[in-house]
Amino acid sequence: MMTGGLVSASPDVMSVLELLAEGAPAARFEELLRAARSKGASGDTLTELDQAVRLASRVQALISHAQQREAGLAALVDTAHDLTLVHGMEALLHEIARRARRLLNFDMAYIGLRDTDDEGRASSIRAAEGETTSRSVGLKTSDGSGLGGLVQRSGAPAWTPDYLADRDVPHSPDIDGVVRAEGLHAILAVPLGYGTTVFGTLYGADRKVRHFTPDEISLMRSLGKLAGVAIERARLLEETRAEVTELELDTSRARSSLNVQRRVEAAYIRLIDLVLRGCDPQTLAEAAAKELSGALVVKDCVGRTVVVTGTPPELTEDDVLRWTYDAHAAGCPVSMPEGGWVAPVTAGGENLGAIVLVPDEPLTDGFGVRLLQLTARAIALILLLQRTSTVAHDQIRDELLEELLSDIRPQPRQLIPRARRLGIAIDEPHVMVIARPEGGPEGRAAAWASSYAHRMSGLVKFHDGCVTLLVPGEDPHAAGTAVSAELAPLVGHPVTVGAAGPVVGPGRVAQAHREALSCLEALTELGNLGCVATPQQMGFLGVLLSETHGVGDYIESVIGPVLDYDTQRFTELTRTLDAYFASSSSPTRAASELHVHPNTVSRRLERITELLGDDWQDPERALEIQLALRLHRTRRTLQHRQTTAGGVRDTGNPAPQRSGPQGPVP
């Protein structure tokens, strides 16, 4: 009911709102509806009340769903915290299985890891929670069978409401026997891995038929990511302990190396103790610098200096970057001609940064190099521990760029916030750059590309020797030139670059990629290796290469000032240009063709020079102008014929109209 411009609700509807605000159960709403019917309420009132009750039920369902998601996320955060406190691989695996069972109220949860002694073609069940038989733990499964096989091949979750009855799952007698013995029906499996490597599977199972919801699958997948990082951390700790044990055994070797091994062991134990006490990279670097007797600098994955100890080394940034890329390509410390050393800081194949050491004296034995490598491992361990609790929310830049370049129509509402969380403003102007080094080590180019993308707040992809970059900017040629200027000296070979843009929003990224790739292919076909090209800089070839730079844009870029002058001043400079080129650049013959005095043609040519520049009669520029005049004249003739025939057909991209002395000119 409308009163004075405001909507007034009936008392019964207000009662529904009061119950909703109190959080009353659904039965109270039904009682309210039955009471209204028993009181003999009118049909309109009952209809209004019934609608209000249904809407209240929907609101309650939404609130309940949000509370369930909140509870799941809270449990996930608690799990992330608790997993960092568990040491030892077996204890960690049992804790993960226990958490998985509690998280989604499974009857049973178990973990399968790839067998390292079987070249990764099979997996073994390493831990289980809620099992009723002894057949699950120790079971070996091949990559071609069960839900685990599907997960290992695709790297994505797989599930079934009733395993034994599902014919789409590749069955095997061993797995079916365990499922039957445990009485399992519904099974959900998610990958365990770190980065892009999948090394195991986390399973959750029920002893009844169960249809998993998207929220449950997503929550289980997040737990799988957390568990993968925790397992990788445990493996790293085991490797560290194994290396310490190896150092202890090495003390029994040749007497000449006894002192070196003891020094390395003692120094590394001191560093590991600092790590286990929760020190930061600065404290660890200072301790390592004392052991190594030199200045030590720690850089992050984008080349920024994060820790400096002692006197900073007198090295140029370019030299440090070059040797950092070589260290990551080699996977071990490398020496620099200036006397310094660079060690990569990596974990699971991921570039976390580098350590630069300038020793007070040359490293003449294995102590310094070995300790430098172990220091890099310790710093990698610190960085992993620092980000373990937040890894569930990390986004992978490679996956985002793959989505932007795919043929699937992007969803801006989803991709723009995701990109913002990565520090990338995809809804602002960006340019696409595809660079191909014509030689040199690919590892160095790939490492540089990753660093450059982080430095520029962009995205990167390295494939088939080509670097694909999406970086902020409005000038694709300037961006391509900057990439070539940095990458060419690094690889020691020319770099051929195709660039396109600018584009705003995720919807046009794939189009800009195709245009940049076309420019790169055109440079290759023309033999112009080591050059930079965009559709705009390639003249009339840009019309063929570009999906947006059409004929009208080309005409405007070449003779636009002349056309605008004719439109504004009602002159005939365009016609004079046509006659001048048609008469083999003879002002006298052009004047005869135009039926004007030669001095008039000379004055017009002077005006054209002012508009187009002094070089407009150079052979290459003159060819572009003649082509633009021909296209302009052809479009005007076709439009005139279509108008005479009864109307201009809509081409979907009409050129701007100019009014000249002879009527509208396209």
Image (cartoon, rainbow, N blue to C red):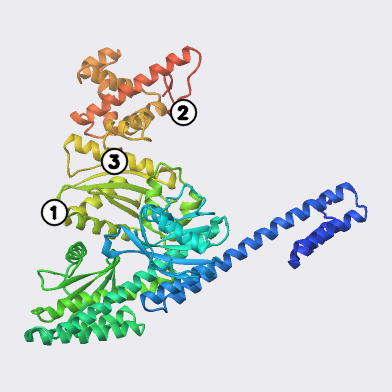
Whether tag 1 and tag 2 are in contact, CB under 8 A, the answer is no
**Cα distance between the residues tagged 1 and 2:** 47 Å
Q: Is residue 109 above or below residue 576?
A: below
Q: Nearer the viewer, residue 528 or 69?
A: 69
**Circle 3: is it few (<14), some (14-19), or many (20+) Cα within 10 Å?**
many
**Cα distance between the residues tagged 3 and 2:** 26 Å
Q: Nearer the viewer, residue 353 or 522?
A: 353
Q: Residue furthest right?
A: 40
Indicate the quadrant where residue 528 lies: top left
Nearer the camera: disc 1 or disc 2? 1
Indicate the quadrant where residue 20 lies: bottom right
Side of 467 where 572 appears, left or right: right
Q: Residue at x 17, y 45 (%)?
A: 530
Callout 3: helix, strand or loop? helix
To which residue does mark 1 refer? 492
Nearer the camera: disc 3 or disc 2? 3
Where is residue 511? Give x, y as percent. Answer: 37, 40
Please state which amino acid type lies under the numbered disc 2.
Answer: Gly
Q: Quadrant of the C terminus?
A: top left
Q: Residue 517 bears which disc, if any? A: 3
Where is residue 221? Give x, y as percent. Answer: 46, 61
Of marks 1 and 2, which one's residue comes earlier in the chain? Answer: 1
Q: Residue 652 bears which disc, if any? A: 2
Of marks 3 and 1, which one's residue comes earlier in the chain? Answer: 1
Where is residue 254? Give x, y as percent. Answer: 8, 84
Please state which amino acid type lies under the numbered disc 3.
Answer: Leu
Q: Residue at x 91, y 52 (%)?
A: 41
